[in-house]
Image: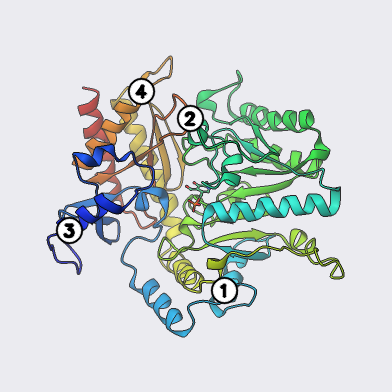
Amino acid sequence: MDGTTTQNDLSHVVEADKRHVWHHLVQHKAFETSDPRIIVEGKGMRVWDQHGREHIDAVSGAVWTVNVGYGRKSIVDAMSEQLMKLNYFAGAAGSVPGALFAEKLISKMPGMSRVYYTNSGSEANEKAFKMVRQIAHKRYGGKKHKILYRERDYHGSTIGAMSCGGQVERNIQYGPFAPGFVEVPHCLEYRAQWDLTGEAYGQRAADAIEEVILREGPDTVGALCLEPVTAGGGVIVPPPGYWERVQEICRKYDILLHIDEVVCGVGRTGTHWFGYQHYGIEPDFVTMAKGVASGYAAIACCVTSERVFDLFKDDASDPMNYFRDISTFGGCTAGPAAALENMRIIEDENLLENTTRMGDYMLDRLGELMDKHAVIGDVRGKGLFLGAELVSDRDARTPVTEAQIGAVVAGCATEGVIIGATNRSVPGLNNVLCFAPALIATKDDIDQIVGAVDKSLAKVFA
Ligand SMILES: Cc1ncc(COP(=O)(O)O)c(C=O)c1O
């Protein structure tokens, strides 16, 4: 292996894992006849498995997290120093890195002002949902409590977050869910619900949100929760015209706008720190997790405007008039210490610019593959978050099977490249390959990734 780990015999580790670890998102029957992949070490864009085999990681830790790459000593040093000084104190008190990271983060988010620390994306979203509900009780007698979410969007794995989940397959067998969450249609033009294109399509898709609001009653709808670019639901960049109209609709009906930046946040979409900043919209809540500290520490944030914050302190004589919530591990100091250094790296290494340049380059390269492989029906994305939708018939847009998508991912792994694909998301439409290389990716890295996809597609669809 490349770094410090010598290639010891890891067979005991594999055995211990097979016997005792319950892996995320995995059907374990396969491990009765094969071994799980164990990732032992990482450096930059590359990881090494238990066999010492090198892979280029085109999905930043499989779920779009390790934005600044593996093996960042300066982040580890910042955490280590902080941990020796003070590892934890509950968030009812402040901490030095907590205050400094909040200040830095807010300096990148004009219009926002308060950071509530938690430890996962699901939990950050739950905090926003609770705030919306509490505002409904304080201002509207509990009536304006409904939260709208979009078909194909995902906001987390807890029952509350799944109640706000637009991915049918993810939710099957886990209900009943919490009441008061209502779905609005997706906005993916490639799978169009309306016979329109471009801006007209974007406006129509946003108008569909207004239709739901009018059906439910605007006085019952408290918030709208959206991903800026839908991630696991198929890499969906909303069409032009969409966001402007969404903002208009929220203002018209006094509906709070909650943007879930758990995937897109902290640079993933390039040029701007956050996905929503590409569109000039003004959210009331922004939640973020994965890229906040690039996976070096578990940290997530629910960020609000001062207008929202004020609603929780306007009457100190009322014992219920504050946000009566805690996240135990939201008080861990390693998170903000790592997040501060993570942001410094992104700034000093110009990674927002690199993400835009490399994202455009990768989109072009995937576009070239489209000319070669009829099975690619659509390529889309923003910055270094990209998808390729595979179809067996371009005209009919018939999705390929999940077995075929799985074979393409496995074919890339054989070439030493880890890519992703939508899974257990939208029934019949788990047919999108996903790419989210670290923001440090170079042209060479992207050429290697696209080269592996090219070879794998040629093999699977020969
Ligand atoms: C858009 C989005 N929101 C929220 C979450 C949940 O984050 P976590 O797994 O940290 O709870 C995810 C996880 O993939 C996500 O993609």
Q: Is residue 171 above or below residue 8?
A: above
Circle 2 residue: 426
Q: Quadrant of residue 399?
A: top left
Return the residue nearer the eye: 177 or 217: 177
The amino acid pointed to by label 1 is Gly
Return the residue nearer the eye: 424 or 296: 424
C-alpha separation, residue under disc 2 versus residue under disc 1: 38 Å
**Image x and y of residue 148, in percent:** 68, 39
**Residue positioned most to the bottom:** 85
C-alpha separation, residue under disc 2 versus residue under disc 4: 13 Å
Task: Nearest to the eye among marks 2 and 3: give it.
Answer: 3
Residue 451 at least partly seen: no
Name the disc covering residue 98, or none. Answer: 1
The amino acid pointed to by label 2 is Val
Circle 4 residue: 400
C-alpha separation, residue under disc 1 versus residue under disc 3: 40 Å
The amino acid pointed to by label 4 is Val
Q: Quadrant of residue 34?
A: top left
Under circle 1, the secondary element is helix
Under circle 2, the secondary element is loop
